[in-house]
Image: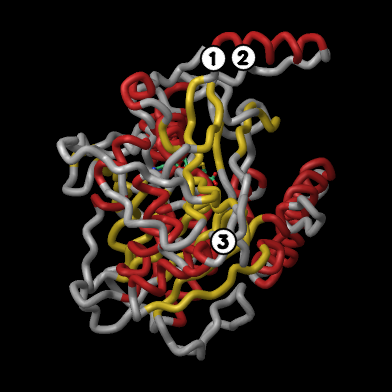
Amino acid sequence: MAIVSFHSFKTTGPVPLASYMRMCLTGDSGGYYTGAIGQGRDQFGVEGDFVTSPEISQIFGELVGLWFIAEWMSQGRPSQGVQLIEVGPGRGTLMDDMLRTIRRFPAMADSIEHVFMVEASPQLRDAQKKLLCGPDAQFTQCDFGVQSNGRHIGKPVVWAESLKSIPIEAEKVPFIVAHEFFDTLPIHTFQSAPAAVTPPRPSSTTSPGGSDKSTETDSAQAHPSPPPSSSYEWREMMVSPTSPAAMASAQAKSKAAGREELAEEFQLILSSKPTRHSRHLPESSPRYQRLKHTPGSVVEICPDASLYAADFATRIGGTSSVRKSRPSGAALILDYGTSDTVPINSLRGVRHHRLVSPFSAPGLVDLSADVDFTAIAEAATLASDGVEVHGPVPQADFLELMGIRERAEILCKASGAKKDTADGAEKSWKRLVDRGPSGMGKVYKALAILPENDGRRRPVGFGGDVAPS
Ligand code: SAH
């Protein structure tokens, strides 16, 4: 039974994959993160659907905290204007471990003006407040959203529903972290196909326009296509409801094969004509343009990822309208995805720690897609001349260079004679740096956006050292 209400399907016909993902994950009428799975059930942990690195071991958040401390030191230990920003903070565990670590560096803790948590889910905002501010802490209204006082460094923790609510101010020093956030951002999928001959349209038609309503007819009216300059064009993969008959037959087949599978209520179909998005997005980079003339080529494009990367870069490096006296701050993006190729067929559904169809039980299944790190790097450097990008490097390299082994030894010794605890801690940290084919150390990667310095200073974790200041 679909929890997410897809009224728009009835009025617009098939919708782009990105619109489907957005409705399923953060839709007002019951997205996966915005209420569909219900009060009292958690997305995270053994009882939930998936486990993330900060939830596996406290060392993860401690080392990410240390990374920002090293950046703060390398950038001359600014004494004020520092902002800690996390996008998509889940249960708040990563920020909690980071702040516990930063507390040990009082000069940095003092320099922090605000801790910003950008979180779409009201339930998760509540869980984060309990963890970071204490069980009885209350929200009060503030300019950016709501806030409460943090228990680690005594600075205000502010919750914003979107990054846009946090003003971009040239004199601030933003330290931004995104862990397993970019993989939740909606993707568009395009496939190259022989160009269709467009019949002439009557000139009396008008365009209804509107966001995410890019049906073939809408888009054809909104952007009359020029005569094809090549014999191939991009077509968008759209999501449409599966017919009741097809659903019944698929379920009968699964049952006969002894499999218990959730019915696929939706299906992916290739648009028969170009759409508003297929005309523009795959033309936005030579990486996609090169593939257009190979029939059947598929590309996944995440415009939101580029917008976030551009926003981070603007905050750090400045632009002609955000004039910084000098670039400052840093962003650390940790996620799984491709380092040099364009992702394809990477959309997946996860429920109760198992891969399931992304088109079943919408709103109850977590959806995610591979992160295109090259696209993020491109968007960041295009947005601001004041930044440079390092990585992506495998998570195992990053964590080992940050000292995971040494920190784990100390923690295991601290757990003393309790062998079970020490064994558990040992297993956990090793899982984070597992370099096996599907190990977290290999699949997950780290990318840093830093103030431009002509590549002279590499950040720690990416082959560099803490620069003397
Ligand atoms: N970083 C956490 C959680 C990852 S899950 C961890 O590693 O454990 C993704 C997180 O992003 C959730 O907190 C989810 O509610 C949030 N999220 C997803 N889409 C969002 C959006 N568009 N804006 C803000 N937060 C979003």
Say which residue appears at 54% left-offset and 52% top-offset. 192
Q: Amino acid at mark 3?
A: His
Say which residue appears at 55% left-offset and 67% top-offset. 290
| Mark 1 CB near ligand 1 (8 Å cut) | no
What sort of colour scheme is used for the picture? secondary structure
Q: Answer whether labels 2 and 1 touch (C-beta < 8 Å).
A: yes
Please state the horizontal and vertical placement of residue 168, each as a whole percent of the image: 24, 63
Q: Which residue is mark 2?
A: 246
381 or 172, which lies in front? 381
Residue 80, above or below 414: below
The answer to which image quadrant residue 404 occupies is: bottom right
Q: Nearer the viewer, mark 3 or mark 2?
A: 3
Please state the horizontal and vertical placement of residue 50, each as a whole percent of the image: 63, 35
Residue 301, above or below 18: below
Dot 2 falls on a residue whose secondary structure is helix
CA–CA distance between discs 2 and 1? Answer: 5 Å
Please state the horizontal and vertical placement of residue 179, each as a whole percent of the image: 52, 52
Residue 373, above or below 41: below
Dot 3 falls on a residue whose secondary structure is loop
Q: Quadrant of the C terminus?
A: bottom left
Of callouts 3 and 1, which one flags the residue occurring earlier in the amino acid sequence? Answer: 1
Q: Is residue 24 left or right of residue 247?
A: left
Q: Residues within 10 Å of mark 3 (few under 14, many from 20)?
A: some
Residue 417, above or below 256: below
Q: Amino acid at mark 1?
A: Ser
Say which residue appears at 46% left-offset and 19% top-offset. 38
Q: Is residue 221 left or right of residue 304?
A: left
Visible residue check, residue 381: yes
The answer to which image quadrant residue 327 occupies is: bottom left
CA–CA distance between discs 3 and 2? Answer: 34 Å
Q: Which residue is mark 1?
A: 243
Visible residue check, residue 180: no
